[in-house]
Image: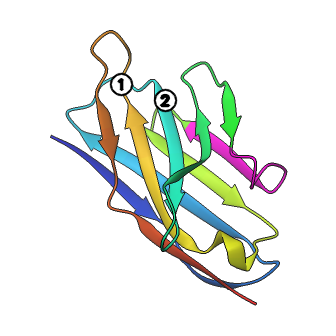
């Protein structure tokens, strides 16, 4: 069984910063992709940022230049540093982890709420 423990969400004023963490534990021995997605009320889930095992970075268009994703492979943990937060960033943020192909598995955290007040 694999568990993704997310932390760091909360309430912040516009222009502020937050750092989210996602730690993987359980029966997971190798991680290919680690990423963050978000879903706001009434909207589809969208990519915020992802990082591969080779440190290739992917960022969603709406957050480019304001967020940085990183990972600590020894700790099986991904971090999302978010700066210059806007009310439009309010959403539930979900951690996603993929194990390497072939036959890779896809795991999701339960989500952490980020609320940005104006």
Q: Secondary structure at mark 2?
A: strand
Q: Residue at x 58, y 50 (%)?
A: 79
Q: Closest to the observer: 25 or 15?
A: 15
Instruction: Give the residues in magenta.
Output: 60-71
Total of numbered circles in the picture? 2
Image height of 35 relative to 105, above or below: below
Q: Is residue 8 visible?
A: no
Q: Secondary structure at mark 1?
A: loop
Dividing the image into 4 quarters, which one contains the C terminus? bottom right
Outermost residue, bottom side: 118
Q: For the residue carrying disc 2, how many other residues have a C-alpha within 10 Å: few (<14), some (14-19), or many (20+)? A: many
* Residue at image point 82% right, 69% down: 84
Q: Are marks 2 and 1 in contact (CB under 8 Å)?
A: no
Query: Which image quadrant is residue 103 in?
Result: top left
Whole-percent x and y of residue 55?
A: 65, 25
Q: Who is closer to the viewer here, 86 or 72?
A: 86
Q: CA distance from mark 2 to mark 1?
A: 7 Å
The answer to if 68 sits in the magenta stretch is yes
Q: Is residue 39 left or right of residue 31?
A: right
User: Dividing the picture into quarters, in which one does residue 11 lie?
Assistant: bottom right
Residue 84 visible within the image:
yes
Q: Which mark is residue 33?
A: 2
Where is mark 1, residue-wise? 99
Q: What colour scheme was applied to this rendering of the protein?
A: rainbow
What is the x, y in percent for residue 73?
Answer: 49, 31
């Amino acid at each position: 069984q694999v568990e993704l423990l997310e932390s760091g969400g909360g309430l912040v004023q516009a222009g502020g910063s937050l750092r989210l963490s996602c730690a993987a534990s359980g029966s997971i021995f190798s991680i290919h992709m680690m990423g963050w997605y978000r879903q706001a009320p009434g909207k589809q889930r969208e990519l915020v940022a992802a990082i591969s095992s080779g440190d290739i970075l992917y960022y969603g268009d709406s957050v480019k230049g304001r967020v940085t994703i990183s990972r600590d492979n020894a700790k099986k943990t991904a971090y999302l540093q978010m700066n210059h937060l806007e009310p439009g960033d309010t959403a539930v943020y979900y951690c996603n982890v993929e194990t390497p192909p072939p036959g890779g598995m896809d795991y999701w955290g339960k989500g952490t709420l980020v609320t940005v007040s104006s």
